Amino acid sequence: MTARDTWTVDRLHHALPHSASRQQLLADVNLTPIDELPAVLDRWAAAAETLQAAASVIEIARANAKAIGPLPDAVTAEDRTADVLRDAGPRDQRGQGAA
């Protein structure tokens, strides 16, 4: 978007990639008091500009991910909660300090 271009609600709506954000934009526009509307629209325009600026970086990342292929399965830590509680001692003694 160049400096000559201006945002409209419709252009903002189409610039947002997800239906949830588009719905939120429309809700904000419809529910915001008139005197607060310029600030709300300025925030949405800034968000749309940020998304547009990030689009090329996102496409590069997608191309790199496609070239590299899937990442190996992540190693997950085993849940050791039961062991920690067992090692902490009987329930009635936990939490009792030296006092």
Image (cartoon, grey):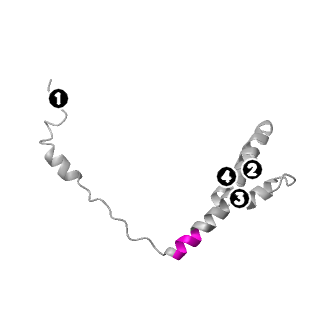
At x 82%, y 55%, the residue is 2
* Above or below: residue 68 compared with residue 40: below
Q: CA distance from mark 1 to mark 2?
A: 56 Å
Q: CA distance from mark 1 to mark 3?
A: 57 Å
> How many residues crowd around disc 2 within 10 Å: few (fewer than 14), some, or many (20 or more)?
many
Q: Earlier in the sequence, mark 2 or mark 4?
A: 4
Q: Give coordinates of residue 88: x percent, y percent.
A: 15, 43
Amino acid at circle 1: Gly
Amino acid at circle 4: Gln
Q: CA distance from mark 4 to mark 3?
A: 18 Å
Label 4 belongs to which residue? 24
Say which of marks 3 and 2 sits in front.
3
Say which of marks 2 and 4 sits in front.
2
Q: Give coordinates of residue 80: x percent, y percent.
A: 23, 54
At x 71%, y 52%, the residue is 25
Q: CA distance from mark 1 to mark 4?
A: 51 Å
Most extreme residue toward the top is 99
> How many residues crowd around disc 3 within 10 Å: few (fewer than 14), some, or many (20 or more)?
some
**Segment tinted magenta in the rendering:** 62-67
Residue 22 lies in quadrant: bottom right
Does 30 appear in magenta? no
Task: Describe residue 75's horizontal placement relative to residue 52 as left or right.
Answer: left
At x 43%, y 70%, the residue is 71
Residue 51 lies in quadrant: bottom right
Q: Earlier in the sequence, mark 4 or mark 3?
A: 4
Amino acid at circle 2: Ala
Per the rendering, the mark at residue 45 is: 2
State the predominant SS element of the stretch in magenta. Answer: helix
Per the rendering, the mark at residue 52 is: 3
Label 1 belongs to which residue? 97
Circles 1, 2 touching at the beta carbon (< 8 Å)? no
The local secondary structure at tag 2 comes to helix
